[in-house]
Image: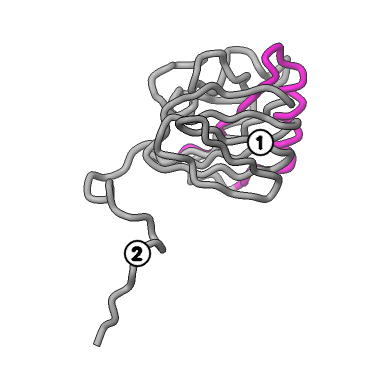
């Protein structure tokens, strides 16, 4: 159940339930990553029960270890343009270079990953660290068995595009 329609590492790809990460660059999700289990539901903002990230991390790592491709992902929050996905990769597995969403961050929940960027640049992140996803094409490699939380905004109003992120500009004094 994967509809490949967006560049956001599967976040726009109609992901639901627990799914393997597909071979296609920039495409998180697959047809059959739940290994016989019923996929957990995708939560909307109206849901009163929040997902347990520790349990999701453990489940996705188990699924990645059982996957032929060493990857698994679960989109657990979808609210308008906001997407949150837990992605697990076993050591040596990677998400090939893919396009970036308009805004996104990556938080390492467990393990150690390398976020790769244009012209061979890379940034290594460990559990507890958060990074802004580059606006250029990028990839992700697992240095060791890892799980990350991808938070992405898949569309932004035209008036917001191109402006500096909050907290990076100067503040004018009011008098």
Is-magenta flag for residue 121?
no
Name above or below for residue 173 compared with residue 37.
below
Secondary structure found at label 1: strand
Residue drawn at x 57%, y 24% as measured from the top left: 95
Label 2 near label 1: C-beta < 8 Å? no
Relative horizontal placement of residue 153, taking residue 128 as reference (left or right): left
Q: Secondary structure at mark 2?
A: loop
Task: Using the numbered discs, state the Cα–Cα distance from disc 1 to disc 2 in whole angstroms.
Answer: 30 Å
The spot of residue 131 in percent (x, y) is 55, 47
Is 51 covered by the magenta stretch?
yes
Label 2 sits on residue: 169
Read off the magenta span: 49-78
Position above or below: 125 against 100: below
Q: Residue furthest front?
A: 119
**Closer-to-camera residue (93/3):** 93
Residue 127: horizontal and vertical position, in percent? Answer: 71, 46
Q: Quadrant of residue 154?
A: top left
Please tell me in which quadrant of the rendered image residue 102 appears.
Answer: top left
* Residue on which disc 1 sits: 113
Q: Which mark is residue 40?
A: none
């Amino acid at each position: 159940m994967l509809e490949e329609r967006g560049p956001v590492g599967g976040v726009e790809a109609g992901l639901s339930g627990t799914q393997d990460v597909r071979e296609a660059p920039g495409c998180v999700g697959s047809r059959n990553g739940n290994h016989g289990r019923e996929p957990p539901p995708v939560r909307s903002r109206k849901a009163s029960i929040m997902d347990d990230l520790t349990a999701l991390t453990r489940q996705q790592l188990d699924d990645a270890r059982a996957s032929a491709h060493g990857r698994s992902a679960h989109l657990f929050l979808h609210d308008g343009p906001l997407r949150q996905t837990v992605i697990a990769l076993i050591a040596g597995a990677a998400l090939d270079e893919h396009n970036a969403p308009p805004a996104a961050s990556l938080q390492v929940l467990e393990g150690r990953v390398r976020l790769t960027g244009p012209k061979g640049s890379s940034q290594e992140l460990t559990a507890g660290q958060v990074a802004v996803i580059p606006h250029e094409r990028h990839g992700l490699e697992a240095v060791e068995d890892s799980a990350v939380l991808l938070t992405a905004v898949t569309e932004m109003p035209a008036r917001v595009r191109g402006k500096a992120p909050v907290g990076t500009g100067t503040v004018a004094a009011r008098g």
